[in-house]
Image: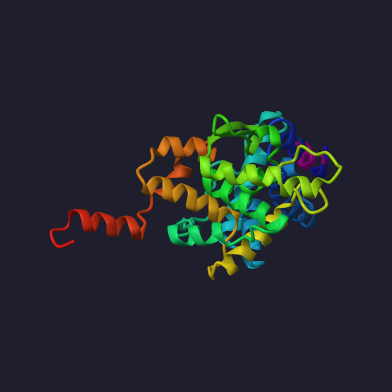
């Protein structure tokens, strides 16, 4: 097999066996294309790739201006690729085993304050179908901590309003159950009974959040609508769907929620990923100071 065939086989493995999401596959694909260019330029067979070749490749990435974070992801991709070749018995050992990626400082997640959340949730115009839909989307996102890809792929059958749960298909095709507060489900119910029917007209769809054309909204639309209402709410910092997810987790933990429970709600495979939300918020610091300092 030539290099392209090996790279294609690895991508197929990621898609069919590991069942990675489309966005994750796209990231892997970008890394593999970059690696393929290096192999072609150097006329190197991936099966004869050496640690020296790898160091030359990293040097080229750095000289080309690739950020430390992107380089770290690239290194991780190549580690996975060569582990795959070893597993498939194409190679006896990985030439990049033990190689360390650039060290990265992990930034604290950006989140909204409680007052900002209140302003954002109240911002959409409740007199238009788009505003009613957006109010429901924002309420559900803050109440559940869903990823953008999970929000835009929600279907009617994923909502169990009586039990107070959403059934979410997350990364890797893993399903999880996420509890949702009654207030958010009430707002969602208002959207389903009114604006959603307006978008549908005489059409039929099981998708939950619809565009004016009656089709599922896109991730880009979701980003744009959040940004629009953030500006309307006077929130100048640039926020995204993930800011809502960060706010959900941060506020739960600041309120005393169990870390394992938050991990399950977010759909994190590794609790270390959830631990980035255990930062102490300024509001929490002030509350602790007031309750415990003699002159608080």
Q: Is residue 25 magenta?
A: no
**Main secondary structure along the magenta-highlighted residues:** helix
Please indicate whether residue 113 sits to the left or right of residue 93 in the image: left
Q: Residue most toward the right? A: 202
Q: Residue most toward the left? A: 294
Residue 85 in sight in this render: no
Q: Which of 169 and 46 is in front in this view?
A: 169
Residue 101 spot, x, y in % from top left = 54, 52
Position of the N terminus, as image quadrant, is top right
Q: Residue at x 69, y 46 (%)?
A: 152
Residue stretch rendered in magenta on the structure: 5-9
How many marks the image carries: the answer is 0
Residue 147 spot, x, y in % from top left = 60, 46
Q: Which of 43 and 128 is in front in this view?
A: 128
Please indicate whether residue 127 sits to the left or right of residue 263 in the image: right
Residue 275 spot, x, y in % from top left = 42, 45
Q: Nearer the viewer, residue 138 or 174?
A: 138
Residue 20 in sight in this render: yes
Q: Residue at x 79, y 44 (%)?
A: 3
Dividing the picture into quadrants, the one containing residue 89 is top right
Colouring chosen for the image of the structure: rainbow
Residue 67 spot, x, y in % from top left = 59, 63
Position of the C terminus, as image quadrant, is bottom left
Please indicate whether residue 93 sits to the left or right of residue 265 in the image: right
Q: In the displayed structure, would residue 25 be above or below residue 109? A: above
């Amino acid at each position: 097999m030539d290099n392209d065939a090996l790279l294609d086989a690895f991508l197929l493995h990621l898609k069919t066996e590991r069942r990675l999401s489309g966005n994750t596959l796209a990231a892997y694909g970008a890394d593999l294309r970059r690696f393929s260019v290096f192999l072609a330029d150097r006329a190197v067979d991936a099966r004869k790739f050496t640690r020296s070749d790898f160091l030359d490749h990293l040097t080229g990435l750095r000289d080309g201006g690739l950020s430390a974070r992107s380089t770290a992801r690239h290194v991780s991709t190549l580690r996975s690729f060569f582990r795959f070749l070893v597993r498939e018995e194409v190679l006896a050992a990985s030439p990049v085993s033990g190689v360390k990626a650039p060290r990265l400082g992990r930034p604290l997640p950006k989140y909204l304050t409680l007052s900002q959340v209140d302003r954002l949730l109240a911002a959409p115009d409740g007199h238009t179908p788009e505003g009613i839909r957006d109010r429901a989307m924002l309420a559900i996102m803050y109440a559940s901590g869903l990823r953008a890809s999970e929000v835009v792929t929600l279907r009617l059958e994923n909502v169990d309003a009586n039990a107070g749960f959403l059934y979410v298909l997350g990364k890797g095709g893993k399903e999880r159950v996420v509890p949702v507060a009654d207030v958010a489900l009430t707002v969602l119910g208002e959207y389903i009974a009114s604006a959603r029917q307006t978008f549908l007209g005489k059409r039929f769809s099981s998708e939950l959040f619809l565009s004016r054309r009656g089709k599922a909204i896109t991730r880009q639309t979701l980003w744009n609508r959040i940004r629009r209402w953030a500006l309307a709410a006077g929130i100048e910092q640039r926020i995204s769907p993930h800011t809502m997810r960060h706010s959900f987790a941060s506020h739960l933990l600041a309120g005393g929620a169990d870390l394992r429970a938050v991990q399950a709600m977010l759909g994190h495979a590794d609790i270390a990923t959830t631990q980035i939300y255990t930062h102490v918020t300024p509001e929490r610091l002030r509350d602790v100071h007031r309750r415990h300092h003699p002159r608080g």
